[in-house]
Image (cartoon, rainbow, N blue to C red):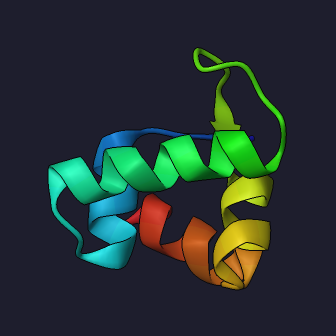
């Protein structure tokens, strides 16, 4: 059974969006704020997709490669 990741990190956001490190960190902070999460809370693929409007399948495909 293949492992599927559910948590996104700054490096993942950089790869998906092509944004800089600082911009990716700001985006993660904005996602946490929108979904009323603590500043140390993890950001899920679902949270990211809801925030950006990207399809979950597209994001998971990028993370697989």
Is residue 26 shown above or below 63? above
Question: Would you say residue 3 is visible in this rendering?
Answer: no
- Name the residue located 60 percent from the left edge and 20 percent from the top edge: 39
Q: Left of 35 or right of it: where is 7?
A: left
Residue 10 pos. (x, y %): 35, 43
- Name the residue located 51 percent from the left edge and 46 percent from the top edge: 28
Q: Left of 16 or right of it: where is 5?
A: right
Question: Would you say residue 23 is visible in this rendering?
Answer: yes
Quadrant location of residue 24?
bottom left
Is residue 36 shown above or below 52? above
For this rendering, which residue is in front, 36 or 56? 36
Residue 25 pos. (x, y %): 35, 44
- Name the residue located 71 percent from the left edge and 69 percent from the top edge: 51
Quadrant location of residue 56?
bottom right
For this rendering, which residue is in front, 46 or 24? 24
Is residue 34 shown above or below 49? above
Q: Quadrant of the N terminus?
A: top right
Q: Left of 28 or right of it: where is 57?
A: right
Q: Left of 61 or right of it: where is 38?
A: right
Quadrant location of residue 37?
top right
Residue 23 pos. (x, y %): 27, 58
For this rendering, which residue is in front, 55 or 26? 26
Q: Quadrant of the C terminus?
A: bottom left
Is residue 58 shown above or below 15? below
For this rendering, which residue is in front, 29 or 6? 29
Count up the numbered dots. 0
């Amino acid at each position: 059974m293949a492992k599927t990741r559910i948590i996104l990190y700054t490096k993942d956001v950089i790869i998906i969006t092509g944004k800089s490190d600082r911009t990716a960190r700001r985006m993660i902070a904005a996602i946490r704020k929108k979904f009323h999460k603590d500043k140390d809370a993890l950001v899920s693929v679902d949270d990211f997709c809801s925030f950006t409007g990207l399809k979950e399948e597209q994001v998971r495909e990028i993370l697989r490669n």
